[in-house]
Amino acid sequence: MKLTTCIIDDDMVSQFATRYCIQQSHGDFEIITCSSGEEGLKTCLSFVDERDKLPDIIFLDLIMDGMNGWDFLENLQNLFKEHSLPSVYVLSAFTNSRDRAIAKDHQLIAGYVDKPLSRSYLQKILKEEEKKRTVS
């Protein structure tokens, strides 16, 4: 089953590294990259319009110009109440203990990942997604 993965990060190097890690996993993915929270929301809106669903997994940077990751999450939750929400994994280059604590308790966040995304952590994510899909 093809998983749709959306990378929302304003750092092109991080986008590339995350995309590369996903591509190297040999899974069946459709990978979309967005350079801002606003672009990420537009992508989600077009997915719902065209496919009647959201991406399966979102890798989200918290620190971005314009709409940051926290604002993106709030908008995602408010705009798509009627849809099954994606698994969101925060990608961070900083070890901000406050952000980690908030992320741990946030209902939309499935995990907090230090940049760059590692193959071992991606495999863990894929196992969780597989479990989630067999239960659904």
Image (cartoon, rainbow, N blue to C red):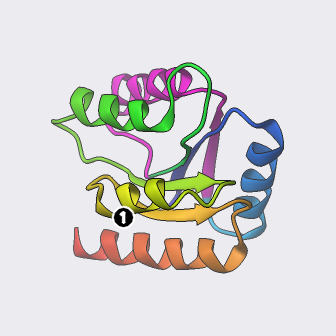
Crowd around label 1: few <14 · some 14–19 · many ≥20 (10 Å): some
User: Was residue 33 drawn as part of the magenta stretch in this picture?
Assistant: yes
**Res 107 → quadrant:** bottom left
The residue labelled by disc 1 is: 104
Q: Magenta stretch?
A: 29-56
131 left or right of 2 in image: left
Label 1 secondary element: helix
Q: How many marks?
A: 1
Q: Residue at x 80, y 54 (%)?
A: 17
Q: Residue at x 70, y 59 (%)?
A: 115
User: Was residue 16 drawn as part of the magenta stretch in this picture?
Assistant: no
**Res 61 → quadrant:** top right
Q: Which image quadrant: the C terminus?
A: bottom left
74 left or right of 65 in image: left
70 left or right of 2 in image: left
Residue 23, position as x, y percentages in the image: 75, 60
**Res 131 → quadrant:** bottom left
In this rendering, is residue 83 above or below 18? above
In this rendering, is residue 3 above or below 31? below
Q: Amino acid at mark 1?
A: Lys
Q: Residue at x 59, y 78 (%)?
A: 123
Residue 39, position as x, y percentages in the image: 55, 22
